[in-house]
Structures are given as C-alpha cells and as structure tokens.
Image (spheres, grey):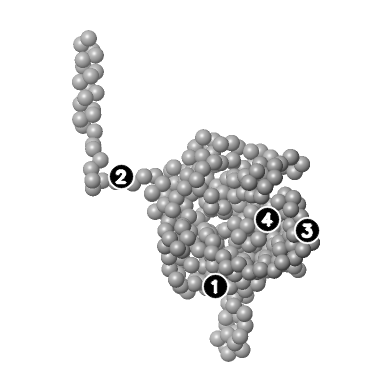
C-alpha cells in the first residue's frame, strides 16, 4: 500500500509540474505548419485550351478558358502540373469511348497567390504515363522563388497520414488549403506506387508526411492491361483507374527531361527578346502560344504520341 501511495504522489507531482499550453504559446497543428511552409510553392496556371474532340469519327472544335493549379519545382521557375489539364486522357478511357482529343494551350500565364500580375510561360514537357506536365516561366521579372526539391524525400508508409497543399479558386481569393490522405497499400505492378484514400485530390501535387518531409507526388494511374473494369469515366465505376502516390525516383526521371526542354525554351525566349530590343518587327505571337511540348515515357526521353499532343511534335 505504501508503494502505491508513493507512486500516486509522484504521478500527481509530474502532472502539476508539466507546462500548460497558454494562449501565447504555439498551438499550431501539423497540417497548418505544413500549409504555412508550402503555400508559396503553389501557383495558378491560366490559359486558353484549343480542343479538337473526335468521338466515334465525329469531330468538334472548341476553346476553353482554363485556370488550374501547379507547383514550383526548384528555383528556376519550372512548374509541375497534371497532364490532364492539357487534354491528357487515360488510354483505357480513350479506347472505351473511341475518343480522340487534340489539345493546344495558348496564352499560357503563371500567377502567384492572389496577385494579378501574369508571367509568360510555356508548356515544355509531358509524361502521359505518369500523368505529369511541366511548364516553364519564361521571364521571372526579377522575382525569386523557392520551389519543392523533388530529389529529396522519404518513402510513404502504409497506414500513415499524408498532407497535401493547394489553393482554392480565384473566386475564393486563391486561399491556401490543405487536405489529408491515408496510405492504404503498396502496389508493385504495373509500377511501384502507393494507393491512397482521403480528401486531397490535386493531381501532380506533392504530399508530405507529418514531419513535413516530401513523400511523393499524387497522380491518377491505370491498372494492368487486360484486367476487366467497370463502366464510367475517371473513376465513375472504372475500378482500373485510381489515385496513387508516385515514388520520387520515377518523377525525377521525368523532371530531368523537362529541365533540358525548359533550358532550351529559356534560351530561345532570350534570343527572341534580344531581337525585339534590337528593333525587330512587332506583332509576333506571345511567347509560348501553341508551343510544342516534348512527350516522355516515364521520363526517359522516349516520345509517345497521344491524342492531346499537337500533330507533328518533335521527338527527342
């Protein structure tokens, strides 16, 4: 009894000596801290998407005003976004609906946060297998940025929570927002990836563990060919397409090809700009309008033409 009494007294003493969280102390949640650290990496892409849609042999042309989200990668003005934003549609969906989409983005601009100033940009590379696209800001106007480093991160773990950061639409002040994902499985085929469920759905955005470490990129992937699947498009009954986390090693292979194309785009832009300053004739199209982007397969530089690419794209 005496030992129990002493143990109880010790427990009470520890509780009384523990510091209480006061109004002036840090009560910030983990998602809130990650949001504060990563919100500035999320930008808006604004463009006009010229579409030629062919369904069962019947063609229709249309234009759509688009504003979507992307994420700054590194410090050179390279932006990662979803290939679906530029007309990229999963192959199984194209087959199921006998669908072809040829898409060309024009008047491509980047906007930071809720600012109104626009920065000329160009679509430089697309990876249809990973559902990723890369856009390069052509003139930073002296602005310094610090984007996400895709070459440093950790592997997702089953059963753990992941945090994603994006922004709301311009109608809601482009307010930074956060969502949660839960890692449910590790898939080995058709490629290594992690299945997830949750509230975060911004494709081609990084996700972080509760320590704030980069854990991969959210994407949409198709299952192995030849597996039966239900009807419906983009998950509406199609159980062979689902959100997953891509390993950083796969994304970095795509990034390397995009960086080469981005460097070429910046060099061309600089040369054209010098010509303008020297008195070249005005009236040329805006930089990046209708530019062709290289198509890579898993970032290895192998071009895989797909509906949505401009006809006649150059192969690397």
- Mark 3, Cα crowd under 10 Å, few <14 / some 14-19 / many 20+, is few
Of all residues, the one furthest to the top in this rendering is 1
Q: Quadrant of the N terminus?
A: top left
- Mark 4, Cα crowd under 10 Å, few <14 / some 14-19 / many 20+, is many
Q: Which circle marks residue 89 in the picture?
A: 4
**Residue indicated by mark 1:** 120
Evaluate if marks 2 and 1 touch, with contact meaning CB atoms under 8 Å apart: no
Q: Looking at the image, tell me whether mark 3 or mark 4 is earlier in sequence order.
A: 3
x and y percentages locating residue 117 in the rendered image = 46, 72
Evaluate if marks 3 and 4 touch, with contact meaning CB atoms under 8 Å apart: no
**Residue indicated by mark 3:** 56
Q: Looking at the image, tell me whether mark 2 or mark 1 is earlier in sequence order.
A: 2
Label 3 and label 1: CA atoms lie apart by 36 Å
**Residue indicated by mark 2:** 27
Q: Looking at the image, tell me whether mark 4 or mark 2 is earlier in sequence order.
A: 2
Q: Nearer the viewer, mark 4 or mark 2?
A: 4
- Mark 1, Cα crowd under 10 Å, few <14 / some 14-19 / many 20+, is some
Label 3 and label 4: CA atoms lie apart by 16 Å
Asked whether residue 300 is in view, the answer is: no
Q: Quadrant of the C terminus?
A: bottom right
Q: Looking at the image, tell me whether mark 2 or mark 3 is earlier in sequence order.
A: 2
Label 2 and label 1: CA atoms lie apart by 40 Å
Horizontal side of 9 relative to 120 (left or right) equals left
């Amino acid at each position: 009894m005496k030992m129990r009494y002493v143990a109880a007294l010790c427990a009470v003493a520890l509780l009384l000596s523990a510091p209480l969280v006061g109004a002036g102390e840090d009560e910030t949640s983990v998602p809130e801290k990650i949001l504060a650290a990563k919100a500035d990496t999320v930008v808006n892409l604004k463009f006009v998407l010229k579409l030629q849609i062919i369904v069962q042999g019947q063609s229709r042309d249309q234009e759509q005003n688009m504003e979507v989200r992307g994420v700054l990668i590194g410090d050179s003005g390279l932006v990662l976004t979803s290939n679906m934003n530029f007309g990229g549609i999963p192959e199984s969906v194209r087959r199921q609906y006998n669908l072809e989409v040829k898409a060309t983005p024009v008047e491509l601009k980047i906007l930071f946060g809720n600012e109104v100033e626009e920065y000329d940009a160009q679509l430089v590379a697309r990876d249809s297998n990973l559902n990723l696209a890369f856009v390069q800001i052509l003139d930073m106007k002296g602005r310094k940025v610090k984007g996400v480093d895709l070459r440093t991160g950790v592997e997702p773990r089953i059963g753990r929570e992941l945090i994603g950061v994006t922004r709301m639409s311009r109608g809601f002040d482009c307010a930074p927002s956060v969502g949660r994902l839960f890692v449910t499985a590790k898939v080995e085929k058709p490629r290594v990836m992690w299945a997830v469920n949750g509230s975060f759905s911004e494709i081609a955005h990084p996700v972080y563990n509760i320590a704030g470490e980069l854990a991969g990129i959210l994407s949409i992937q198709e299952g192995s060919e030849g597996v039966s699947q239900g009807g419906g498009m983009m998950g509406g009954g199609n159980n062979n397409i689902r959100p997953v986390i891509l390993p950083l090693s796969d994304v970095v292979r795509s990034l390397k090809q995009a960086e080469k194309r981005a460097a070429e785009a910046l060099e061309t832009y600089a040369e054209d700009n010098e010509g303008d300053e020297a008195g070249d004739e005005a009236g040329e199209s805006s930089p990046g309008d209708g530019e062709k982007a290289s198509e890579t397969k898993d970032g290895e530089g192998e071009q895989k033409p797909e509906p949505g690419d401009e006809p006649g794209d150059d192969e690397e």
